[in-house]
Amino acid sequence: MKMRGRQVLMQTLLNHGVDRIFGNPGTTESPLIDSLLDYPQIQYIVHLHEGVAVGAANFYAQASGKTAFVNLHVAPGLGNAIGMIYGALKNSSPMVVTAGQQDTRLRLRDPVLGHDLAAMAAPVCKWSVQVERADEIGPILQRAFKIANEAPAGPVFVALPIDVMEQETAIGPGAPATLFEASRPDPAGIEAMAALIGAARRPAIVAGDDIARVGGQAALVKLVDAIGATVWFEGLRGRNSFPTDHPAYRGTLAFDAPGVAKQFATNDLVLMVGGPFFEEVWYGPGSPFAPGTKVLQVEAAPARLAYNFTLDAGVVADPRAALEALVDAAAIDPAEAKRRNGALAEQKKSEDAAQKARVEKAWARTPTSMARAMAEIRAGAPADVVVVDETITANLDLFKTFVFKGPDDYFSGRGGGIGQGVAGAIGVAVAQDRRPVLCLSGDGSSMYSIQALWTAAHHDLPIVFVILANREYRVLKHNIDAYRTRFDVKSNKPYMHMDLTGPVLGFVDLARGMGLAGTHVTKADDIKAAVAAAFKSGKPHLVEIEIEGKR
């Protein structure tokens, strides 16, 4: 029985469990759009910008555990999305990105919107290809889903010419293979790691995003409790793989090697699990590890092992399986573990008291301090809220105010590209429709994907978008300070082009123009009530909070 190429595409999606398409339609996507009525099982999430569609799909993949599917529009549309595809690559999000392509019979005529789409996408994808005939659609999509999910996961790109989608083929859609990919660790590797951990007096663990993806948090907690280790997150991470109220949680690592080395200064062993390790912003000489520090690493694929650092032991395995094996093998004196854990608990009490004092000191400042804003937002939000985070300079206060116990309590972007938060909140809300979603974003970051507000209204997604408006690119002001220090630039010049004034952005007006109600808060005393009312409405709502700028 013959099928048209578009039918093979749609049936392949159903076979692979795809029930949502994130996209922005155009002429070359007509075969897919016109087929949607025949496939009611698949919902099309409409976006006004291709970058927003990919940003939403990126976070959807993280929150749902599924492979996200995206449909873009030819060369300009793919170009609009490249930055967000890069973010998905850094986030290791399994994603199949497609774009309609012009009729192949026009290839030599340089048609409107025509370009080599596969070449455009290749630098930010694991695999990039154009389908040349209908017979290839099924096999190429089958391969695309496979490659997107192989560790480390990430986006792949497939260009779909409009005429090929209408060709007939006898080669039907494929179905996902039944694979058992959670590899067990080499016993010799676990034995070597266990011996090194047993000899260490001050072990530390860097918990990567992959622990959250494979459900390894409980195993990590058991290991931490058994050996009395401290736990760190990378400066940029998409998930939290360890409960942030645990006494062993120490925070996030710095963005340069000397800064990380300072944080690891007292550790004689560092175990890194499930991540690229490390994304640096600034060059700094030397290693993040002190001389003599034992360095261990666990990864699901060999490519990441010893990629940046010489290892004393490296193991390829499913992170959860490796952590469970280490729990059984890495035995230390229980009394010593109790002593270490007790010291960490005392340190946690001291840090909590310091944060409380910090908030109290900043409580009455005008405009509202970031510390107080976070305290008021937390007080107004539901207890089970899911946070989508792009706070950047307010991130420290966020993590000292909110408690993230499970890996599905928090989602963020990797790679450093901004605008991921407001777009990503759409994907999280689509994936997790039983929990309230709070999107926290700075004003500058939000403007990169502000069109996401329309999608939230169009699909009636009850997201509360909180915009922290300091009327500046605050992180850039911090970074220019760092630049001047690092490169010995003597300057007392002002910060050029980093203020979002003249005119001031009106976020409530922007929200209203895209179908959302909005609340503008200028006084700290009004934040809690505004956030609570936004959630109570059960509708997408934007709360703009004026906060202090750089002091």
Image (tube, grey):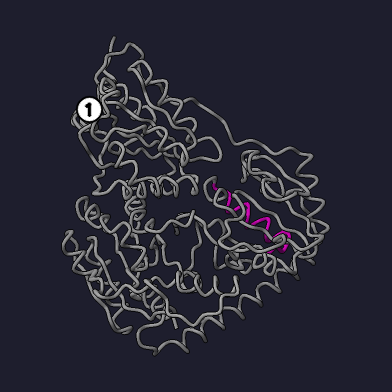
Q: Secondary structure of the magenta portion, mostly?
A: helix
Q: Where does the image place residue 91, in percent across and percent down from the top left?
A: 49, 49
Viewer-closest of 219 and 450: 450
Whether residue 219 is in magenta: the answer is yes
Q: Where does the image place residue 426, in percent across and percent down from the top left?
A: 32, 52
The correct choice, above or below, for 230 with respect to 66 in the image is: below
Image quadrant where residue 389 sits: bottom left
The correct choice, above or below, for 46 with respect to 234 in the image is: above
- Screen quadrant of the C terminus: bottom left
The residue under label 1 is 31
Observer able to see residue 313: yes
Q: Where does the image place residue 121, in percent across and percent down from the top left?
A: 41, 38
Viewer-closest of 195 and 339: 195
Q: Amino acid at mark 1?
A: Pro
Whether residue 303 is in magenta: the answer is no
Q: Where does the image place residue 118, in percent across and percent down from the top left?
A: 40, 32
Image quadrant where residue 141 sits: top left
The correct choice, above or below, for 51 with respect to 354 in the image is: above
Please give the range of residues in magenta: 215-230
